[in-house]
Image (tube, rainbow, N blue to C red):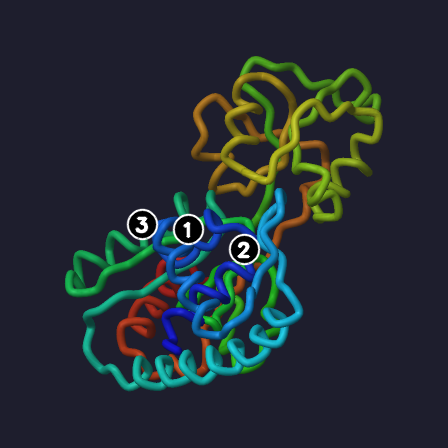
Amino acid sequence: MEWNDLRIFLAIARAGTLAGAAKRIGQTQPTMGRRLRTLEAAVGDALFQRTSEGFVLTAEGTVMLAYAERVEEEVLGLERKLSGRDAGLEGLIRISSSDWFGVHMLTPVFANFSKKHPGVTIELITDARLFSLSRREADMVFRIRPFDEADIVQRKLMHMPYGLYAARGIKVAGNGRGKGLSLVTMDTAFGGLPDVTWLQRVLPHAHTVFGSNNREAQARMCAAGIGLAVLPRPLGDATPGLKLLDLGEAPPGRDVWVGYHSDLRRLARLKALLDMAVDMLGT
């Protein structure tokens, strides 16, 4: 039984579909299916039940999952230890962040870093889901809440101010607590975020017409005159056609945290990139 087969098994178990698993680990669906059949033949049991909604673990697959995760932990721990001893400024660094933060805040850092250290390859993954540092899904993660994973080195990078925006040319009355106004905000899954609850409190009579977990989409809809939007100031200020509103109270900002696994603390290229991010963005 090979580690690559167990890796494919874990990807399918976590994604629930061959397509999702293939995307996770950069394989094709036919390859994933073929390797899974090989693994099941070696084990002598079906590890998944194929359903119309995806792959569901069988009893044997559930037993296999526990063992495979322990093997994964050992393999990835070894990889982190070996990577952490690397003293050269070359190799790959995988970075995860939200979409807008990666585009507007991190790409200037990456551009400067790449000019100084052309031997390092940076991969930026923008995704709403939280990537695991322990599983090496990313080497460094930027996000708006502290990390609670074990063995993570983290620090607060900066405080991000937010503002309320409207399209230029749109007149916004200062009273009525939102009566007659339209809002562009987060989708319902993120209804508990501070900027969403702030909007509900300050403009309780406004009507939400568009929701998305993508801040870039919110900014574009706001600039199109669809509704008011609370946006991170660097994004709102850089979006053509928007103006910053003052209702006498600014929306709450968010702290931005950066973290990496403690096994990588001696990785020279990671430390150099973090130092540059702190120098350019840190507050």
Q: Could you tell me how far apart the alpha carbons at marks 3 and 1 are, in whole angstroms?
A: 27 Å
Q: Is residue 83 left or right of residue 185?
A: left
Instruction: Tell me if residue 156 comes above or below residue 225 in the rendering.
Output: below
Residue at the image position 27 percent from the left and 66 percent from the top: 92
Instruction: Tell me if residue 213 comes above or below residue 105 in the rendering.
Output: above
- Amino acid type of disc 2? Ala
Residue at the image position 53 percent from the left and 64 percent from the top: 257
> On residue 108, which mark appears?
3
- Amino acid type of disc 3? Pro
**At which x and y percent is residue 110?**
29, 55
Pick whichever, 69 or 180, lies toward us: 69
Pick whichever, 249 or 198, lies toward us: 198
Tell me if label 3 and label 2 are in contact, CB under 8 Å: no
Q: Could you tell me how far apart the alpha carbons at marks 3 and 2 are, in whole angstroms?
A: 33 Å
* Label 1: few (<14), some (14–19) or many (≥20) C-alpha neighbours in 10 Å: few
Q: Could you tell me how far apart the alpha carbons at marks 2 and 1 are, in whole angstroms?
A: 9 Å
Pick whichever, 82 or 51, lies toward us: 51
Q: Is residue 44 left or right of residue 116?
A: right
**At which x and y percent is residue 232?**
55, 43
Q: Quadrant of the N terminus?
A: bottom left
- For the residue labelled by badge 2, is the local secondary structure a helix, a strand or a loop? helix
Q: Earlier in the sequence, mark 2 or mark 1?
A: 2
Instruction: Tell me if residue 71 comes above or below residue 277 in the rendering.
Output: below
Question: Where is residue 268, by image quadrant?
Answer: bottom left
> On residue 23, which mark appears?
1
Question: Where is residue 246, by image quadrant?
Answer: top right
